[in-house]
Image: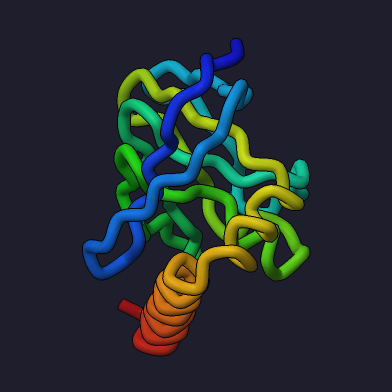
Amino acid sequence: MILPDWQLPTVIPGGSRVTEEIGGAATKTFQPGEVIFREGDVTQGEAYLVHEGSVEARRLVDGTERLINTLVKGDLLGEVALFREGPHSVTATAIEHVTLVVIPAHRLESMVRANPELAIGLIRQLARMAAGKDSAQGSGS
């Protein structure tokens, strides 16, 4: 499925909003309960922007599956694997009907290079995620 030309909102952690013109963006849709990708899966060279619905991100911590985040419209998904050039660090599952806008790695990188506010927001988000992962694993809770 291809979306027509439209303005794609990207939410920056901290409440700012950036609008990027993206025409003809490819999308993927998922039904409730459908797995988008699993922790440990190799990235497909793309990140996703939640356009419709919500997604749960879960990770195994000390053998127990933990809810890490719930993503909604405007949230990025899969960017961690792209930036670290490694496998996905969470399992992402559709909570309800979900439409994701596909953002190829090269496009995400050019968006970050062209928009310092987006870059800072992503750095902050990645730092919070790293801190949460370290504390969750270290505390054993």
Q: Position of residue 26 (x, y in %)?
A: 62, 23
Of residues 68 and 63, the one nearer the viewer is 68
Of residues 140 and 112, the one nearer the viewer is 112
Of residues 23 and 73, the one nearer the viewer is 23
Residue 115 in view in this figure: yes
For image coordinates 46% across by 65% down, the residue present is 118
Q: Position of residue 54 (x, y in %)?
A: 32, 34
Residue 137 in view in this figure: no
In this image, 30 relative to 52: left or right? right
For this orientation, the residue located farthest to the left is 15
For image coordinates 77% across by 64% down, the residue present is 85
In this image, 53 relative to 7: left or right? left
Q: Position of residue 106 (x, y in %)?
A: 75, 51
Q: How many marks?
A: 0
Placement of 5 over or under 77, stated as above or below: above
Q: Position of residue 139 (x, y in %)?
A: 35, 87
Placement of 114 over or under 30, stated as above or below: below
Of residues 37 and 27, the one nearer the viewer is 27
Quadrant into which the C terminus falls: bottom left
